[in-house]
Image: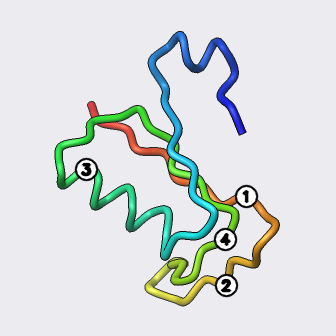
């Protein structure tokens, strides 16, 4: 997956994973480490996805799972 040229020109970047625990958790860890975005975190599979209200989220391989890290 590549970003559209307009997104790249606007400063968006993308980190792609085959599998990750959670794109949301990965984004949070990156933000805590100083990443400011805008950054898409994508994965073909999530092994520990998180839904609303702390519910488990099953993320089967073959779909796109993504979180967007933004900072104002």
Q: Earlier in the sequence, mark 1 or mark 2?
A: 2
Could you say whether the residue bearing mark 1 is in a helix, strand or loop? loop
Q: Residue 28, position in %: x, y?
A: 31, 59
Q: Are marks 3 and 2 in contact (CB under 8 Å)?
A: no
Q: Name the residue beneath numbered marker 4.
A: 45
On the rendered image, what quadrant is the C terminus found in? top left
Q: Residue 61, position in %: x, y?
A: 76, 73
> Is 62 left or right of 37, judged from the image as shown?
right
Q: Are marks 2 and 4 in contact (CB under 8 Å)?
A: no
Label 4 packing within 10 angstroms: few (<14), some (14-19), many (20+): many
Q: Name the residue beneath numbered marker 3.
A: 31
The circle on residue 58 is: 2
Q: Name the residue beneath numbered marker 1.
A: 64
Q: Earlier in the sequence, mark 2 or mark 4?
A: 4
Above or below: residue 54 compared with residue 45: below
What whole-number distance in Å separates the C-alpha atoms at marks 4 and 3? 21 Å
Q: Residue 37, position in %: x, y?
A: 35, 34
Could you say whether the residue bearing mark 4 is in a helix, strand or loop? strand
What whole-number distance in Å separates the C-alpha atoms at marks 4 and 1? 7 Å
What whole-number distance in Å separates the C-alpha atoms at marks 2 and 4? 9 Å
Q: Earlier in the sequence, mark 4 or mark 3?
A: 3
Above or below: residue 42 compared with residue 45: above
Which residue occupies 25% across, 50% down?
A: 31
Q: Earlier in the sequence, mark 1 or mark 3?
A: 3
Which residue occupies 65% across, 28% down?
A: 3
Please state which of the two labelled residues, at mark 4 or mark 3, is closer to the viewer.
4
On the rendered image, what quadrant is the N terminus found in? top right
């Amino acid at each position: 997956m590549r970003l559209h040229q307009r997104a790249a020109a606007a400063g968006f970047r993308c980190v792609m994973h085959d599998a990750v625990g959670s794109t949301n958790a990965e984004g949070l860890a990156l933000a805590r480490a100083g990443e400011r975005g805008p950054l898409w975190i994508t994965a073909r599979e999530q092994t520990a996805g998180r839904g609303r209200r702390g519910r488990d989220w099953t993320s089967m391989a073959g779909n796109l799972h993504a979180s967007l890290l933004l900072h104002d």
